[in-house]
Image (cartoon, helix red, strand yellow):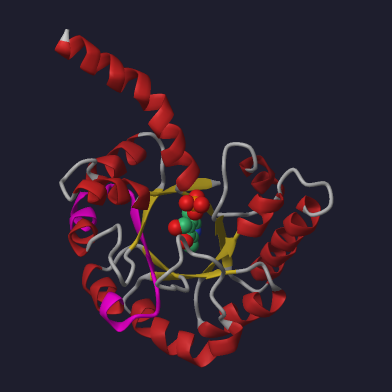
């Protein structure tokens, strides 16, 4: 199983000061150097974290794969067709949400999704649909021609450790993955995965890649803080 690292939070921190640090491009290189098999960035319609320039630069600097998360927006589709990332992951997007809240309703808009992803597939970009682990959504995803699904693991992550609900949510993921694989879809997973709950992903046979952001960046803050403080203390002594 491979790890894709989502670096949106690095851009959020950079944008808080409007400057250039921390640099998402440098973060991506560090992730790659330490075993990430791909880098995910979500170019949101409101550009609240990752900016167009980040995406263009990553296209030239990454040594692994760029996975571009995007909504069904024509201007973002145009950028994707220009830079041709290794893959795109289609997500629903709401202006006010803090992060991607639910899976894409593919079943409710099969034709629209099919039409939207066709030029991307024709351009040689792998297309993944971010969906809830639900039979209807898996079957609809297959109909669109997408090669991958990314299962939304948020409900499992929230239920983790809860006697009544963890197993229920986990079984939804397992069954959705089995169904998807049986009809020829490749399966990724992500959202809310952390250092405690990630181990159960190994019980799902054949998962290709996990996309993880928040827990990794959060941990990095604390593992990096001692060195950062120490260095400054020594500098000002
Ligand atoms: N996969 C998708 C489609 C997402 O939208 C996100 C969050 O941006 C992730 C994975 C990563 O989720 P988290 O930051 O909770 O690890």
Taking the magenta stretch, the answer to whether it contains residue 64 is: yes
Taking the magenta stretch, the answer to whether it contains residue 152 is: no
* Above or below 129: residue 65: above
Residue 137: image quadrant is bottom right
Residue 176: image quadrant is bottom right
* Above or below 212: residue 119: below
Query: Which image quadrant: the C terminus?
Result: top left
Q: Position of residue 54 (x, y in %)?
A: 22, 56
Farthest residue, direction bottom: 111
Q: What residue is at 35 percent from the left and 53 percent from the top?
A: 8
Q: What residue is at 36 percent from the left and 26 percent from the top?
A: 224
Magenta extent: 57-76
Q: Which of 200/123 is in front? A: 200
Q: What residue is at 54 percent from the left and 88 percent from the top?
A: 110
Q: Position of residue 155 (x, y in %)?
A: 66, 58
Residue 169 located left or right of residue 230: right
Q: Position of residue 104 (x, y in %)?
A: 53, 75
Kindly tell me whether residue 174 is visible in this rendering.
yes
């Amino acid at each position: 199983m491979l790890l894709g690292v989502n670096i949106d939070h690095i851009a959020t921190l950079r944008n808080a000061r409007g400057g250039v640090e921390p640099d998402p491009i440098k973060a991506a290189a560090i992730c790659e150097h330490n075993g990430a098999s791909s880098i995910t960035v979500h170019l949101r319609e409101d550009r609240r974290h990752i900016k167009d320039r980040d995406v263009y630069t990553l296209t030239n600097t990454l040594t692994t794969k760029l996975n571009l998360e995007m909504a069904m927006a024509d201007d973002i589709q145009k950028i994707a067709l220009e830079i041709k990332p290794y893959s795109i992951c289609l997500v629903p997007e709401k202006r006010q949400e803090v992060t991607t809240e639910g899976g894409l309703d593919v079943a409710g808009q099969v034709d629209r999704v099919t039409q939207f992803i066709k030029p991307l597939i024709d351009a040689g970009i792998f297309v993944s649909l971010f969906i809830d682990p639900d039979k209807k959504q898996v079957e609809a995803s297959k109909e669109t021609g997408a090669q991958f699904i990314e299962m939304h693991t948020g409900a499992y992550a929230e239920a983790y450790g809860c006697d009544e609900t963890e197993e229920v949510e986990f079984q939804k993921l397992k069954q959705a993955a089995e169904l998807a694989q049986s009809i020829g879809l490749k399966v990724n997973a992500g959202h809310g995965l952390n250092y405690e709950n990630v181990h159960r992903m190994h019980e799902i046979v054949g998962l290709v890649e996990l996309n993880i952001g928040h827990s990794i960046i959060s941990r990095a803050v604390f593992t990096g803080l001692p060195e950062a403080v120490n260095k400054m203390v020594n500098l000002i002594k």
